[in-house]
Amino acid sequence: MSTDNPDLPDAVRASWHRFADTYEPLRGELYRYCRHLTRSPWDAEDLAQDTMSRAFAALGRMGSAPPNPRAWLFRVASNLWLDHVRRPRLSIEPAPTTSSQPIELRDAAGTLLVQLAPQERAAVVLKDAFGFSLEEVAGILRTTVGAVKAALHRGRGKLLAPEVDAGRAPARGVVDAFCAAFNARDIERLTALLLDMATVEVVGATASYGTDETRNQMLRGMLFGSERLANAATQGGIEARFVGGALPTPPRAETRIYRGEAIALLWYAHQDGEHVRAINRFEVDGDRVVHMQNYFFTPDLIAEVCTELGISSRPNGYRWWLSREGCP
């Protein structure tokens, strides 16, 4: 018996959109919570994306909606992170000593917690940074109020400098080559930088594996999507309120070093000048790209990276599915 159901993707998308109506307003807080737990904006965005996906799947198995969506979403994030750090091959290690000044986070007390047991770190962040009650923290972490009090007593007052993800950093030459091809609007040169089975991903939206037409469409979208961005009020793509004076001029790519890693900033033209609206990150093998991530629908990550670099940015929101029919 065939299990094919051509209407299933549309039904799942519709359910996801209804889910986002409730949980998307919490997305900024969720990112900040994940940022306190993890050691980099990239890991925080990954954890936030995984949390939303896990929460969506879990909600479909529940008999009724959670009475406190905020606490429940934070519980899902806590469980994912605790499961991750408790795996035998993983451990939380102290950040390496560095002569550079710690980068102060702007939100929710602006600190990460130093060498603590995972549950202690989560307890301090939930209570001190996000204002949950002792009872709510105990519920989120599936423990007792007494255990939460003990964790708070042990954990408060310790700080941790952000970690540089040096192991990920690609050779700058690869990123420079990408930016040069991007600014020349040369799709063939861009494609030539990718391994045949390279993955191109718009984080939180879609991904393409290998040499298929979808990958070329995604690259063209990065190169020339500014026209649709500028006309989002009538063409869809993002919420019209995020257009912010964007012009249809194709974006400009620039290599920057961020926390020891070469990344590509995509500068978009606006009526009041250029602002970064997307960031590309790369995994490489030699002089070819294995995995490219385009951070466009990730406003929290873009804001943090650009603030640390001291440059201007504009958000695109989280919603990538808006169509012409969804526009006023």
Image: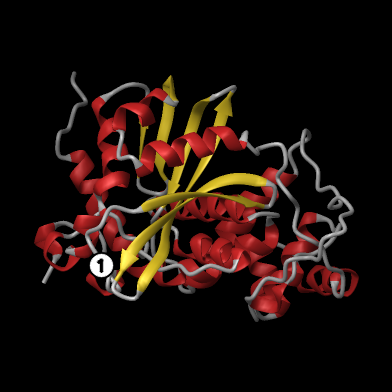
Say left or right for 117 vs 14: right
Q: x, y percentage for residue 325?
A: 9, 60
The quadrant holding residue 20 is bottom left
Q: At 72% from the left edge and 63% from the top edge, which residue is drawn?
A: 122
Q: Which residue is mark 1?
A: 239
Q: x, y percentage for residue 199?
A: 43, 30
For this rendering, which residue is in front, 215 or 185?
A: 185
Q: How is the image coloured?
A: secondary structure
For this rendering, which residue is in front, 253 or 115?
A: 253
The quadrant holding residue 216 is top left
* For residue 312, above or below residue 207: below
Sort mark 1 into few (<14), some (14-19) or many (20+) by Cα contacts within 10 Å. Answer: many
Q: Quadrant of the N terminus?
A: top left
Q: x, y percentage for residue 323?
A: 16, 56
- Residue type of the residue flagged with mark 1: Glu
Q: Quadrant of the C terminus?
A: bottom left
